[in-house]
């Protein structure tokens, strides 16, 4: 009888531990990662690029949608074919490269590094053509003007610069109050530049005069990404305050906030037709981030890091959780057929977009 009772207690103990384990996994999943999921068949995973050794911070498509360039913490910028993921150029830098952009004609790539240098490279042979010491610290963001004649860059201490690569001249645009300038975007006509950063502000600049014409104070934390729609009528901003906001560029009024982001937003990009917007974000809640970076524990499942939105309605169309860490950059191909996402998990993922 004693043996039977002991076995019964042991069975109940094992069953209790099993139930507790299942409950703990559920609780941890809610605490460490976002629980929200939206399934759809708008996008499908096409290719995973795994040639980086460390976290990838930026990914961009070439204007003809045939090439992809990616860069990050490791000091090598990879230019690779979209069709098969084969690297055609490996641009070596002395330090990591947070910022990257193709020229409008696709013949050149500009890079911004931890060393404060802007560099321009020829895509066809990987030749370094120009170097500028435009900043005293890390270059966090850069972009070409639509005519390719100017490169705008953002750096530490509120630094915004306009660089003419043909003659090396640099203009400084003072205006941000403090901290890093993370992201910049030219309007489609090239007459306006938008910059955003750590001071929670979006600055709108008249490019010809270099003067601030408007300031948007609509986020409560750092703004990490800004993007224009192709028709120039909307500006999107993504922030550490866990929001994506859309602004009317006629009067810079708020059009809508896209609800559904539950963590810091690191990147936003419009589809070429302006009807959809893709966002990339942190993959876990604060506790999950702490455990991941302190102890290497990522939780029982991946968090949502990529979201696809309908711009007009603000509806969340699809969410993706294929990355195992934060997504720092997202991009749409110029032909609208592909989406790219770059992550701290050292990979770039390419998603095929289904025809509408």
Image (tube, grey):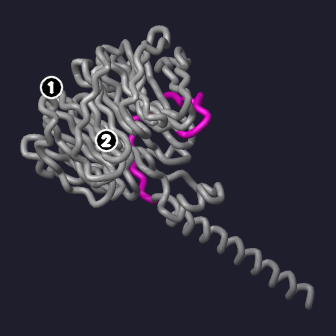
Which residue is situated farthest in the left direction here?
A: 251
Which residue is situated farthest in the bottom direction here?
A: 1
Provide the secondary structure element on which disc 2 rests.
loop
Between the residue at mark 2 and the residue at mark 1, the CA separation in whole angstroms equals 23 Å
Q: Residue at x 26, y 52 (%)?
A: 177
Provide the secondary structure element on which disc 1 rests.
loop
Question: Which segment did they paint magenta?
Answer: 35-55
Who is closer to the viewer here, 349 or 210?
A: 210
Q: Is residue 71 left or right of residue 235?
A: right
Q: Which mark is residue 336?
A: none
Which residue is situated farthest in the top direction here?
A: 125
Q: Position of residue 226 (x, y in %)?
A: 28, 41
- Is residue 275 in view from this perspective? no
The crowding category of the residue bearing disc 1, from other C-alpha atoms within 10 Å (few below 14, some 14 to 19, many at least 20), is few
Name the residue tied to disc 1: 189
Q: Residue at x 37, y 50 (%)?
A: 265
The crowding category of the residue bearing disc 2, from other C-alpha atoms within 10 Å (few below 14, some 14 to 19, many at least 20), is many
Name the residue tied to disc 2: 159
């Amino acid at each position: 009888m004693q043996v039977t009772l002991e076995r019964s207690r042991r069975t109940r103990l094992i069953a209790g531990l099993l139930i507790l384990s299942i409950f703990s996994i559920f609780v941890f999943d809610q605490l460490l990662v976002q629980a929200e999921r939206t399934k759809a068949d708008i996008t499908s995973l096409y290719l995973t690029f795994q040639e980086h050794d460390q976290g990838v911070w930026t990914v961009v498509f070439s204007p003809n949608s045939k090439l992809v360039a990616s860069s990050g913490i490791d000091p090598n910028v990879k230019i690779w074919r979209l069709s098969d993921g084969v690297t055609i150029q490996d641009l070596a830098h002395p330090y990591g490269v947070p910022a990257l952009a193709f020229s409008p004609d696709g013949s050149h790539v500009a890079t911004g590094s931890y060393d404060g240098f802007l560099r321009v490279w020829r895509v066809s042979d990987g030749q370094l053509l120009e170097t500028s010491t435009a900043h005293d610290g890390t270059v966090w963001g850069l972009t070409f003007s639509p005519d390719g004649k100017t490169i705008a860059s953002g750096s530490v201490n509120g630094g915004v610069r306009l660089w003419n690569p043909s003659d090396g001249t640099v203009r400084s645009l003072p205006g941000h109050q403090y901290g890093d300038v993370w992201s910049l975007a030219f309007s489609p006509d090239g007459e306006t530049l938008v910059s955003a950063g750590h001071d929670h502000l979006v600055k709108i600049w008249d490019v010809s005069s270099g003067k601030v014409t408007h300031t948007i104070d609509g986020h409560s934390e750092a703004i990490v990404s800004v993007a224009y729609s192709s028709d120039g009528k909307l500006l999107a901003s993504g922030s550490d305050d866990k929001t994506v906001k859309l602004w009317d560029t006629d009067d810079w009024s708020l059009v809508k906030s896209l609800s559904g982001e539950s963590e810091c937003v690191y990147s936003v990009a419009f589809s070429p037709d302006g009807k959809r917007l893709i966002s990339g974000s942190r993959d876990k809640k604060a506790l999950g981030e702490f455990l991941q970076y302190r102890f290497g524990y990522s939780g029982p499942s991946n968090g949502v890091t990529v979201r696809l939105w309908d711009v007009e309605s603000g509806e969340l169309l699809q969410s993706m959780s294929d990355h195992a860490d934060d997504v720092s950059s997202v991009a749409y191909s110029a032909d609208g057929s592909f989406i790219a996402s770059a992550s701290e998990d050292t990979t770039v993922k390419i998603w095929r977009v289904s025809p509408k």
